[in-house]
Amino acid sequence: MGSQQNDGTSYPPSEPKPCANNCGFFGTAGNQNLCSKCYRDLSIQEEHAATAKTAMEKSLLLPAAAAITASPAVLVAEPSSSAEPSAAPAKAANRCGSCNKKVGLTGFVCKCGTTFCGTHRYPEKHECSYDFKTAGRDVISKANPIIKADKIQRF
């Protein structure tokens, strides 16, 4: 009885429509009459097209900007090439900087940028190059700016 009556609260069932790509599944109006798989493929293709379009626009704008500022681009390239050899002698991040012991996930990264084991994690134990005193002074000076009051004019 309940299925026969329609009190206006629900929509009458419609005939399922086949997928617009003729893949054999049924499509829905919300998915442009495509099945879920075809709709997902279509949306992925649209995303790739959009990213390719933005990449193409950026690449077209980049040569114009490079032609205007050709000399600074050369200056930027020189420091990056000199930075690469200095990165080569750096130690692995999974070993202690003092005793070369494997630390794995339990390593402690110091403010000087080196990883240490539990024994050498304190700055006093590994001869830390980070200047804690100056860093502390800088933090305090930034947090507490100097405030000068206006001079009082006497009559």
Image (tube, helix red, strand yellow):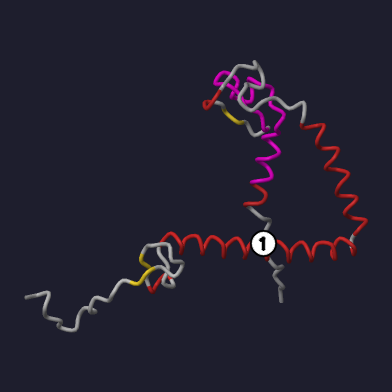
31 relative to 79, above or below = below
- Residue in front for this viewpoint, 34 or 129: 34
Question: How many labels sit on residues?
Answer: 1
- Residue in front for this viewpoint, 48 or 75: 48
Q: Secondary structure at mark 1?
A: helix
Residue for badge 1: 52
- Classified by dominant secondary structure, the portion drawn in magenta counts as loop
Residue 59 falls in which quadrant of the image? Answer: bottom right
Locate the C terminus by quadrant: bottom right
Give coordinates of residue 36: x percent, y percent.
Answer: 41, 62
- Left or right: residue 62 compared with residue 18: right
Amino acid under disc 1? Ala
Q: Residue furthest right?
A: 71
- Residue in front for this viewpoint, 99 or 86: 86
Magenta span:
113-139
Give coordinates of residue 66: x percent, y percent.
Answer: 86, 60
Residue 33 falls in which quadrant of the image? Answer: bottom left
Counting other residues with Cα less than 10 Å from the Cα at mark 1, is it few (<14), some (14-19), or many (20 or more)? few
